[in-house]
Amino acid sequence: MFTRRLDEALRNERGGQVSYLLMGKGDFGSKHLAVTWVTGGPGSEQPQHEHPENEQAYVIVAGRGEMLVGEERLDVEPGTLVLVPPRTRHAIRNTGRETLTYVSATSPPFEPPSRESRFAYR
């Protein structure tokens, strides 16, 4: 059995949202998937971005937000899944009063950070 807790994961912050890389490329022998747990306070917003080869699924766990995928906007709440195809601009923003929490699964997985930059993520 392979496990990792949030306090053991690589940590990165952007736009007021904190990402914890629970499983990256090569972790636990995985070759095709990365999984990230993300939290963000009210008003936090992930910058718009796209991935040239990766598809990404967001699953909202807690809180409320607005997801931008291409030209579409969608209000999201717990239990909502949003699939983002490769080469599609996307972002998520917390529009509620509570912490927004979501899980992101990406395939193929992102390249792992270099050893030097891993320490910047803690």
Image (cartoon, rainbow, N blue to C red):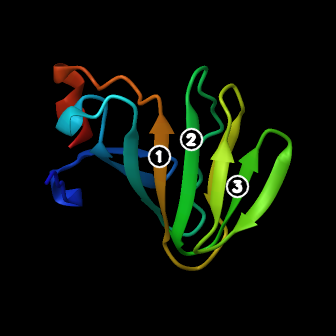
Disc on the earlier residue, 1 or 2:
2
Q: Quadrant of the N terminus?
A: bottom left
Question: What amino acid type is highlighted by mark number 2?
Answer: Gln
* Secondary structure of residue under mark 3: strand
Disc on the earlier residue, 3 or 1:
3
Q: Of circles 3 and 1, which is in front?
A: 1
* Secondary structure of residue under mark 2: strand
Distance CA(mark 3)–CA(mark 2)? 13 Å
Instruction: Kindly give the residue lying farthest to the right in the view shown.
Output: 71
Q: Is residue 31 left or right of residue 63?
A: left
Residue 9, given in percent of the width and then of the height, sits at: 22, 48
120 vs 38: above or below: above
Q: Which residue is mark 3?
A: 67
Q: Is residue 100 left or right of residue 121?
A: right
Question: 101 or 28, which is in the foreground?
Answer: 28
31 vs 47: above or below: above
Disc on the earlier residue, 3 or 2:
2
Q: Which residue is mark 1?
A: 105
Discs 1, 2 touching: Cβ within 8 Å: yes
